[in-house]
Image: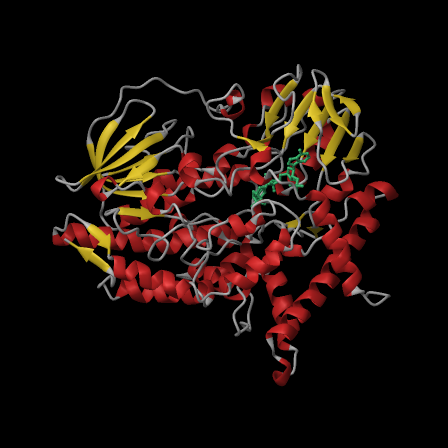
């Protein structure tokens, strides 16, 4: 699109600052409620599958994988391929799928192209039916991986780990759970995912509401009717429904609610930026002709990551062509258009800002083009830089505000005030509702031990919470000194590829499987990173571009990306390889293929 008037960068900066100031609050993350063990614990109960009675387990496995989402599935599959058979996945859900088990709200969909988002496509032979697959297909794919790789055999579902303790004399981990299990494992992996603990806003009166209320990750289809495939929620006809939140989840489910509810009230504190989605079915002939060849998915993963991350070399080809690669290519093209002699840090950041302002102007203009009511359109415009919050892409969200029964309730950046027996209060006005849906997100910046619900006790009784008291410390984001035979499946201190989280697991899962096979083949009982190797790695990470990124985020409107505006209190260790994900994946591949696993001790 063309911009008729020049953009006043200084005026935009001032507007962004003012909107941020309006939203900053001293309580930061503490504005939210932790639900487990409170009178609100029913909000985290599993509405999808009954919890079945079973006897406690007291046996031994070679590997215990904590978390049955993509992290556990990929690593489990790679372990089985490597011939490690005696493994057990443990998950608090009733089946595999992790985030896709829980998030069954209507419209749930991946927002990175499914050819790179859905793991093990080539191995399973599944071809995603859409460019951005919907939740039921992704959940089914998770089950497919579980079945194909025999991961159901020894699994413990609806089970939460409570404690992991290193048994030094026996070189084993003792795993204790909330179901009375106490079994041993030679190796453990921790892949609990970044967004698995739902949170509610800490609103006065939250337990007093007399209507129906639930969190989006525990959708109550019994009440709403419809199903995860997006069938019309017929039971909401004539009902007054309020949804709190306008993040990525709300963007996906509001169009379905708008079609179903008698009246829908969307309570908005900060709007998301919503760009064009452009989803469509996969052309299977094209897939067979142009894509399918041995190693195609790895090639696509590498193409995505090379296009999406901000390296100096822009790939000629973009196989994936989704919202993320387009976003990065746009930024890089603008920066590379600077004459060589002008390539200073200041000019690069200025070029980035100018481009960002143009993009956000385009996104705000799209709101005016789509939304009929002028006041609603004004209130749906995002006033912050695009990467301050998860960028959203959707072709029915803004349109939903044109449905006659849908109303945006603007809270002027302050949020809902309180809950009453009958509904919600904003600016002193009560909105009477039959149902409240909390699209209020998940814990991110909270302490990992309390979020996971278990601590880890390593050599000499050292707790992981103590070892990480000043922030995460690891080699490759996988190994922690003092915690032998324990592998973390995350991304931080490795590639830290946030736009396509499963790619982190694809690489670390394979690496872990190779290390475990190596130890078992050679008869080693323990694998541990040396203090020296861990320190050297952390020193290398310190040279990263994180400070520049943290600088940008610290000026952003509050949200989980910047620890609710308190990014300085976040540890400086949530970073990645200084030369980005492409360099990290290349390095890790070489490191594991050499078979020496430098920095580790096998004993
Ligand atoms: P978010 O944390 O992104 O959003 C929570 C929302 O609740 C925000 O709009 C927040 O406002 C709002 N909120 C919180 N408290 C109040 C209050 N008192 N009054 C009014 N509003 C309030 O959670 P989501 O579940 O939307 O998304 C979490 C993440 O999950 C995404 O960022 C993404 O990474 C992932 N996701 C991915 C999807 C995909 O397409 N693959 C789809 C859905 C989620 P404010 O912004 O002001 O804090």
Residue 422 visible here: yes
Q: Position of residue 586 (x, y in %)?
A: 38, 66
| Along the line of sight, the residue nearer the viewer: 490 or 413 | 413
Instruction: Specify the farthest residue to the front.
Output: 26
Question: Which quadrant of the view contains residue 461?
Answer: top left
Give the colour scheme shown: secondary structure
Q: Position of residue 214 (x, y in %)?
A: 60, 25
Residue 308 visible here: no
| Quadrant field for ligand 1 | top right
Instruction: Specify the farthest residue to the bottom.
Output: 341
Q: Residue at x 86, y 42 (%)?
A: 375
| Along the line of sight, the residue nearer the viewer: 489 or 419 | 419
| Along the line of sight, the residue nearer the viewer: 590 or 427 | 427
Count every numbered label the image shows and give the total. 0
Position of 505 with respect to 422 (left or right) is left
Quadrant containing the N terminus is bottom right
Q: Residue at x 66, y 55 (%)?
A: 386
Q: Position of residue 87 (x, y in %)?
A: 26, 39
Q: Name above or below for residue 143 compared with residue 48.
A: below
Position of 69 with respect to 309 (left or right) is left
Question: Which quadrant of the view contains residue 56?
Answer: top left
Q: Position of residue 122 (x, y in %)?
A: 41, 53
């Amino acid at each position: 699109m063309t911009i008729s008037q020049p953009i006043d960068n200084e005026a935009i900066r001032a507007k962004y600052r003012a909107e941020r100031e309006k939203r900053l609050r001293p309580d930061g993350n503490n504005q939210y409620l932790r639900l487990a063990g409170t009178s609100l614990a029913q909000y985290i109960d599993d509405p999808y599958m009954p919890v079945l009675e079973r006897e406690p387990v007291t046996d031994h496995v070679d590997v215990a994988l904590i978390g049955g989402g993509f992290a556990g599935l990929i690593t489990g599959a790679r372990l089985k391929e490597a011939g490690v058979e005696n493994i057990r996945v443990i998950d608090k859900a009733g089946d595999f799928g992790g985030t896709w088990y829980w998030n069954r709200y209507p419209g749930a969909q991946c927002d990175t192209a499914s050819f790179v988002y859905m793991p093990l496509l080539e191995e399973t032979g599944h071809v995603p039916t859409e460019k951005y697959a919907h939740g039921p297909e992704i959940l089914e794919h998770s089950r497919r991986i579980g079945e194909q790789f025999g991961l159901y055999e020894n699994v413990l579902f609806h089970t939460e780990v409570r404690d992991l303790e290193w048994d030094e004399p026996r070189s084993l981990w003792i795993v204790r759970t909330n179901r009375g299990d106490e079994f041993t494992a030679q190796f453990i992996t921790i892949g609990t995912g970044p967004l698995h603990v739902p949170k509610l806003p800490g609103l006065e009166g939250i337990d007093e509401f007399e209507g129906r209320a639930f969190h989006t990750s525990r959708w109550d289809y019994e009440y709403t009717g419809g199903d995860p495939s997006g069938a019309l929620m017929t039971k909401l006809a004539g009902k007054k429904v309020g949804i709190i939140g306008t993040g990525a989840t709300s963007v996906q489910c509001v169009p379905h609610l708008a079609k179903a509810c008698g009246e829908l009230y969307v309570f908005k504190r900060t709007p998301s930026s919503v760009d064009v989605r452009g989803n469509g079915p996969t052309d299977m002939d094209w897939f067979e002709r142009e894509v399918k060849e041995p190693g195609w998915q790895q090639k696509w993963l590498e193409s995505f990551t090379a296009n999406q991350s901000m390296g100096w070399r822009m790939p000629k080809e973009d196989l994936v062509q989704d919202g993320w690669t387009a976003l990065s290519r746009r930024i890089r093209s603008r920066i590379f258009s600077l004459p060589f002699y002008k390539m200073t840090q200041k000019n690069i950041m200025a070029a980035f800002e100018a481009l960002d302002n143009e993009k956000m102007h385009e996104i705000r203009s799209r709101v005016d083009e789509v939304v009929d009511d002028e006041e609603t359109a004004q209130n749906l415009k995002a006033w912050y830089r695009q990467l301050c919050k998860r960028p959203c892409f959707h072709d029915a969200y803004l349109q939903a505000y044109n449905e006659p029964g849908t109303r945006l309730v603007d809270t002027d950046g302050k949020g809902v005030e309180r809950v009453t027996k009958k509904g919600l209060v904003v600016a002193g006005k009560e909105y009477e509702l039959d149902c409240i849906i909390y699209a209020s997100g998940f814990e991110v910046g909270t302490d990992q031990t309390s979020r996971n619900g278990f601590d880890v006790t390593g050599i000499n009784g050292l707790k992981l919470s103590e070892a990480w008291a000043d922030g995460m410390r690891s080699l490759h984001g996988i190994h922690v000194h003092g915690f032998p035979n324990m592998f973390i499946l995350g991304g931080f201190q490795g590639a830290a590829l946030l736009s396509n989280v499963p790619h982190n697991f694809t690489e670390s899962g394979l690496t872990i499987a190779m290390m475990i096979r190596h130890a078992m083949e050679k008869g080693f009982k323990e694998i541990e990173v040396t203090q020296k190797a861990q320190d050297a790695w952390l020193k290398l990470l310190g040279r990263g571009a994180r400070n520049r990124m943290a600088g940008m985020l610290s000026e952003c409107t509050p949200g989980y990306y910047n620890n609710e505006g308190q990014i300085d209190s976040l540890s400086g260790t949530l970073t990645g390889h200084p030369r980005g994900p492409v360099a990290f994946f290349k390095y890790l591949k070489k490191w594991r293929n050499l078979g020496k696993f430098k920095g580790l001790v096998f004993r």
